[in-house]
């Protein structure tokens, strides 16, 4: 397939509810959107870096420069027979897995459309639908209890609570008092250190399915030390940006569950390698989210159809995040299950162009 041109936008969508995690608050979802064009088809992807480096090190301004000046000019005008052919363009550069992911994911969409296949089939996915839970931002205990109640009512298969130092054990006591048996997890987004062992061990008493990313974003070794001293499974998120990190974490037993975000690890090929390696180690995985809009959510759902995504993912209904999405197809869960979008081949969703134009803050063409 020959890439004829690329369109790069920045989209800004207001969030219905500000999303608070241990590292900061997000009020608007701001993201790069890439449209790769070739052979009369379009491939779409969103990137998941933030304006500033608060989740990982990448930033939107850095990614835009890298995409505009380096990656997209290397793609446009060239032919690629499969996603693996992108390696010579992407692999020489250090890090920047999120910037690489937007290119790789848009190409997977374009390529599967050229093959006339749903993305999930091109990836080797087998599931017809995907189990999902919710990720609830940091809020008061009262507000959290209301939001847990809404989520349980809606049938979500797991509730994940964002925690931070000083907003952990008491929150869990309050939630477990009302909901003793729901599938419950916590996500610390790196807020603790090994020296916080006593409070982390105190969280062992709540029957959590796992504790997500308690320690530093660039650590694997300390997580392994922590896992030895915890009953609850540790689940790595930020620490895993490549299949090499995944291998090291699995060999070190730094966790018993893994969160795979396709936008964090450089795209579908890397995500699938991590998935397969976890499967070989008998470690279940689930698909994380970055508050994506419809394009990113569609990619996440297709990836989640691979067989070792056995724990509920974070891709809950789009209407929980946004008043209006950028895609025409509603991406809504019912009873904790979301359907794989299938309007045509590829990711199976189409852009709502008139609306997209109203939320586009920047647009450029690479040809
Ligand atoms: O750590 O999983 C995370 C959102 C932004 C940054 C980091 C994370 C998250 C979420 C939200 O947990 C998941 C979602 O609902 O998309
Ligand atoms: Mg996380």
Image (spheres, grey):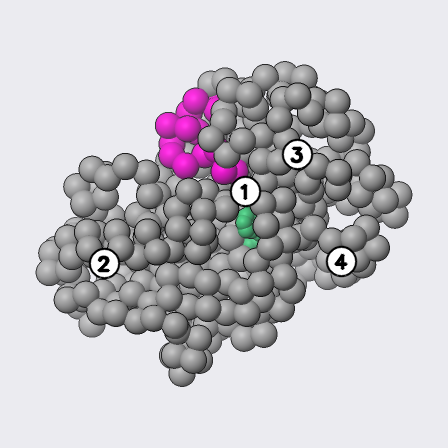
| Residue sitting at x 51%, y 53% | 290
- The label nearer to you, 4 versus 3, is 4
Disc 2 marks which residue?
A: 68
Question: Do the CB atoms of the residues marked 4 and 1 lie less than 8 Å apart?
Answer: no
Disc 4 marks which residue?
A: 147
Quick one: which residue is furthest to the right in this view?
A: 177
Task: Give whichever of discs 4 and 3 has the lower sequence position.
Answer: 4
- Report x, y in % for residue 169: 79, 36
Residue 333: in sight, yes or no? no
Question: Do the CB atoms of the residues marked 3 and 2 lie less than 8 Å apart?
Answer: no
143 over 188 or under it: above or below: below
Say the numbered circle drawn on residue 210. Answer: 3
Describe residue 108's horizontal placement relative to residue 51 as left or right: left
- Report x, y in % for residue 325: 51, 72
Determine the secondary structure under disc 2: helix
Say the numbered circle drawn on residue 286. Answer: 1
- Density class for disc 4 (Cα within 10 Å; few <14, some 14-19, many ≥20) is some
Give yes or no for residue 246 being in the magenta stretch. Answer: yes
């Amino acid at each position: 397939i020959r890439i004829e041109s690329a369109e790069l936008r920045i989209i800004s969508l207001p969030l219905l509810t500000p999303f608070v995690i241990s590292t900061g608050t997000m009020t608007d979802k701001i993201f790069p959107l890439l449209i790769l064009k070739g052979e009369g088809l379009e491939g779409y992807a969103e990137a998941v870096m933030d304006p500033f480096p608060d989740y990982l090190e990448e930033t939107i301004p850095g990614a835009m420069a890298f995409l505009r000046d380096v990656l997209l000019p290397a793609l446009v005008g060239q032919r690629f027979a499969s996603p693996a052919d992108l390696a010579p363009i992407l692999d020489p550069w250090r890090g920047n897995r999120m910037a690489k992911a937007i290119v790789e994911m848009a190409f997977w969409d374009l390529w599967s459309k050229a093959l006339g296949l749903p993305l999930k089939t091109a990836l080797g996915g087998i599931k017809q639908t995907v189990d999902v839970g919710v990720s609830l931002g940091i809020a008061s205990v009262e507000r959290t209890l209301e939001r847990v109640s809404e989520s349980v009512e809606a049938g979500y298969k797991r509730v994940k609570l964002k925690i931070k130092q000083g907003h952990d054990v008491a929150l869990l006591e309050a939630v477990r008092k009302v909901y003793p048996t729901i599938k419950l997890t916590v996500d610390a987004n790196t807020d603790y250190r090994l020296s916080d062992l006593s409070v982390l061990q105190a969280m062992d008493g709540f029957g959590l399915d796992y504790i997500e990313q308690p320690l530093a974003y660039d650590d694997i070794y300390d997580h392994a030390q922590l896992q030895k001293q915890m009953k609850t499974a540790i689940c790595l998120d930020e620490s895993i940006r490549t299949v090499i990190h995944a291998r090291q974490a699995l060999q070190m037993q730094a966790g018993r569950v893994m969160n795979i975000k396709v936008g964090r690890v450089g795209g579908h090929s890397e995500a699938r390698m991590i998935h397969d390696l976890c499967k070989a180690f008998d470690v279940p995985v689930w698909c994380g989210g970055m508050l994506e809009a419809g394009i990113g959510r569609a990619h996440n759902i297709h990836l989640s159809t691979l067989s070792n995504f056995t724990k509920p993912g974070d891709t809950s209904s789009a209407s929980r995040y946004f008043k209006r999405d950028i895609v025409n197809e509603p991406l809504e869960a019912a009873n904790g299950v979301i359907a794989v979008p299938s309007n045509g081949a590829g990711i199976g969703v189409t852009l709502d162009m008139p609306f997209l134009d109203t939320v586009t803050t920047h647009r450029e063409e690479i040809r």
